[in-house]
Amino acid sequence: MVLFIVVIAVYGPWLTDIPLQDVLPPEIPGIPFQPPSPEHPLGTTIYGFDVYARIIWGARVTMSMAFIPVLIMMGGGLILGTISAYFGGTVDYLMMRFVDIMYSFPMTILIIILGPLIGQGLLATLIIYGVLSIPYNI
């Protein structure tokens, strides 16, 4: 299922002939609530948008949003875990206590607290989520 969604997200522009500007709200809406047809495989919405094209473009955005925190948390966890394993002893002990402290805080509350301090917007939230998830990957 995940592989199917990734393939749809990556090859989406070739699977639909409707470009992104036609997925955004038009000045003159299309015919609302068309049933599925060869032209619109999943039908249209109340505003006449093609549901199939919107799902494909939505999958692209969702996959790119998932990629940023995963890249940050896996990279940070790899670096900190390697440092902890290489030096051992006191460094390992301090890293493990840091991880224990991070486990005690709910991540959602930390994101809500740090959001206004670091910046608003989707990219800032994804970066905060990735950085706060690093202890879970050490």
Image (cartoon, rainbow, N blue to C red):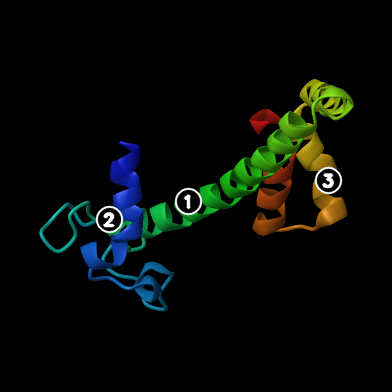
Q: Mark 1: which secondary structure?
A: helix
Q: Which residue is mark 1?
A: 62
Say which amino acid is labelled 2.
Tyr
Closer to us: 26 or 12: 12
| Residue 94 percent coordinates (x, y) | 88, 27
Q: Nearer the viewer, residue 91 or 24?
A: 91
**Mark 1 vs 3, N-terminal side:** 1
From the image, which quarter does the N terminus lie in? top left
* Label 3 residue SS: helix
Give the labeled residue for mark 3.
Answer: 114
Q: Quadrant of residue 87?
A: top right
Question: Residue, x 22% and y 62% (percent of image)?
Answer: 15
Disc 2 crowd, CA 10 A, few/some/many (<14, 14-19, 20+) = some
Q: Which residue extends farthest bottom? A: 27
- Of labels 1 and 2, earlier in sequence is 2
Give the labeled residue for mark 2: 52
**x and y percentages locating residue 17 in the rendered image:** 23, 70
Question: Whole-Å distance between the Cαs marked 1 and 2?
Answer: 15 Å
